[in-house]
């Protein structure tokens, strides 16, 4: 009789453990399928307002934003793209933004100094390269940055006053000793996309853009990268949450998402390098 009782107790314990384990597994599997994601439920109806450099538009619009919204179906991401300098000014003037991703530290640091950035979230995230491009059917004998001093036509760069790509271009031309030879030939674009389009459409003989932009347009070809020593610092893209976002939980999840392997892989596909 005692043996029978012991067997019944053991059987009961095993049954309870099995039910608990099955419940945990089922819940985990359901979460995996997206059926019981409490984080998603908490974020339903929230919005992430993204202010991002123009050179990030393709990566965000074509891949990253759809990926995030699929992962968090109750959240909408609303992007604003422009030159980093223009975005800095817009944020200073009250642009409704939760996350800012700049093409240079200059604009991010300015906003941080004005206490408009949550600096504890500031991440040195991506790297890019500066390249010289020409129209794909160009017959001009341009093989290096040094050849720019012999160009008789137009050289397109971003406006150095507000466009990081233009600031990098001016720095490269200055450090290579050819700024004075090229300044009168420059056509200044409002952002790096405008520069890319000038060259792609043939309204400029050549231009200086990021390698990721050149990669995105089949109507241009890369002549070369900016040579060693042309830039004193690497082209860094920082990302951070702004102070007092309207939906901090959603903004935090978006920041976390950008730093996942799946998101980083997308940036790499577009030609960026992850800054380590």
Image (cartoon, rainbow, N blue to C red):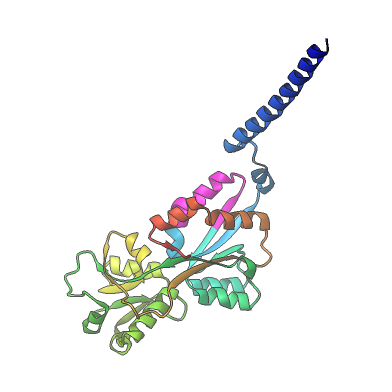
- In the figure, residue 181 lies in which quadrant? bottom left
Most foreground residue, 265 or 16: 16
Res 43 visible: yes
For residue 32, above or below residue 9: below
Judged left or right of residue 27, residue 53 is left
Coordinates of residue 141 in the picture (x, y in percent): 17, 75
Judged left or right of residue 18, residue 206 is left
Coordinates of residue 8 in the picture (x, y in percent): 78, 15
Please identify the residue farthest to the bottom as the structure is shown: 180
Most foreground residue, 258 or 170: 258
Q: Residue at x 52, y 62 (%)?
A: 80
User: Is residue 74 shown in magenta?
Assistant: yes
Q: Residue at x 29, y 65 (%)?
A: 200
- In the figure, residue 28 lies in which quadrant? top right
Coordinates of residue 174 in the picture (x, y in percent): 35, 86
How many marks are shown on the rendered structure? Answer: 0
For residue 85, above or below residue 252: below
Coordinates of residue 226 in the picture (x, y in percent): 32, 75
Judged left or right of residue 68, residue 208 is left
Q: Where does the magenta region start and end?
A: 59-78
Res 118 visible: no
Q: What is the chief secondary structure element of the magenta stretch?
A: helix
User: Is residue 217 shown in magenta?
Assistant: no
* Quadrant showing the N terminus: top right
Q: Residue at x 72, y 21 (%)?
A: 15
Please identify the residue farthest to the top as the structure is shown: 1
């Amino acid at each position: 009789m005692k043996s029978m009782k012991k067997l019944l107790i053991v059987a009961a314990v095993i049954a309870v453990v099995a039910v608990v384990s099955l419940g945990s597994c089922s819940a985990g599997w359901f979460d995996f399928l997206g059926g019981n994601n409490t984080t998603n439920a908490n974020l339903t109806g929230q919005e992430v307002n993204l202010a991002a450099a123009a050179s990030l538009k393709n990566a965000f619009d074509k891949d990253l934003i759809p990926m995030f919204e699929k992962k968090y179906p109750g959240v909408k991401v609303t992007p604003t793209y422009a030159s980093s300098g223009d975005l800095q000014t817009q944020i200073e003037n009250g642009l409704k933004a939760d996350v800012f991703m700049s093409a240079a530290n200059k604009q991010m640091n300015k906003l941080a100094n004005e206490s408009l950035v949550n600096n504890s979230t500031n991440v040195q995230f991506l790297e890019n390269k500066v390249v010289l491009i020409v129209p794909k059917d160009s017959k001009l004998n341009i093989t290096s940055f040094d050849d720019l001093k012999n160009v008789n036509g137009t050289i397109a760069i971003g406006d150095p006053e507000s466009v990081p790509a233009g600031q990098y271009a001016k720095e490269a031309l200055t450090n290579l000793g050819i700024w004075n030879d090229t300044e009168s030939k420059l056509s200044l674009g409002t952002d790096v996309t405008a520069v890319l389009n000038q060259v792609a459409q043939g309204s400029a003989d050549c231009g200086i853009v990021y390698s990721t932009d050149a990669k995105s347009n089949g109507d241009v070809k890369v002549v070369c990268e900016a040579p060693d020593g042309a830039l004193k610092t690497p082209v860094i893209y920082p990302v951070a949450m702004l102070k007092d976002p309207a939906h901090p939980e959603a903004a935090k999840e978006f920041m976390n998402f950008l730093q996942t392997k799946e998101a980083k892989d997308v940036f790499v596909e577009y030609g960026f390098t992850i800054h380590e």
